[in-house]
Amino acid sequence: MISRTKVDDYFAKRNELLEELSELENTEKFIKETAKTIDELNKEKEEHSEIIQLINQDKSDLEREIAAAETEKKDRESKIVKRYEALLKLIESTNEKLKETGCDIALSQDDLPQTHLKIEPPAAPVTPVLSGGLPSPFPNFNFRNLFQPMLLEQLGSFSTNSPTPQFRPPPHMAAAMQHHQLKVTDHQSPPMKVVKNFL
């Protein structure tokens, strides 16, 4: 009986050992697989970090470019407004001269290109009004025959031959466009792809 008890005790303890070994093996396997997963996550994190840095750099570049473009836009708008105002004054003074010479034609503001910019109309000049008017300095000369054909010809050629303005990017925008085209494009975010296609 004693020997039987010893044998049973041996096998019981042996089974306990096998269970412990099995649990140890499972724990080691879990640690190994988890460590492998952590390494993969770290590598992926580094790759994503590089991508995020590229995206942030692209974003900063575009923000600088758009700031420069906004400044250039304001300067160009100011110059255009001054050109419009100068042309409006020229139209007014020219029409006054044409009226004085007896021509029945006049330049029109409608000939100017349409714009959304706010253009201040020229101030009306204050001129004395004479009841009898001024006599023509050249009573026997018909100014209509002199001005009308030339003006009509010039206005007609202006309306038919004026080239359609084409957009040209400013130098700094053109350089930025070429810079982005030459960059390594292993990865680009969808917003950057959209902006690149627009540029």
Image (cartoon, rainbow, N blue to C red):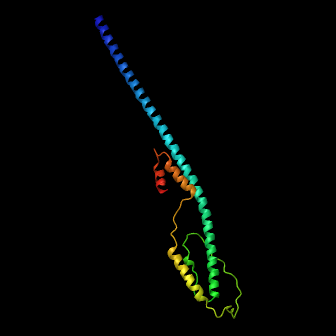
Q: Position of residue 83 (x, y in %)?
A: 62, 71
**Would you say 99 lies left or right of 52 here?**
right
Q: Residue at x 64, y 84 (%)?
A: 97
Q: Nearer the viewer, residue 51 or 37?
A: 51
Image: 25 above or below 55: above
Count of numbered marks: 0
Figure quadrant of residue 88:
bottom right
Image: 162 above or below 137: above
Q: Position of residue 134 (x, y in %)?
A: 69, 91
**Would you say 86 lies left or right of 111 here?**
right
Q: From the image, which quarter does the N terminus lie in?
A: top left
Q: Position of residue 164 (x, y in %)?
A: 50, 69
Q: Residue at x 63, y 80 (%)?
A: 92
Q: Position of residue 171 (x, y in %)?
A: 57, 57
Q: Nearer the viewer, residue 191 or 186?
A: 186
Q: Residue at x 42, y 30 (%)?
A: 36
**Would you say 138 lies left or right of 161 here?**
right
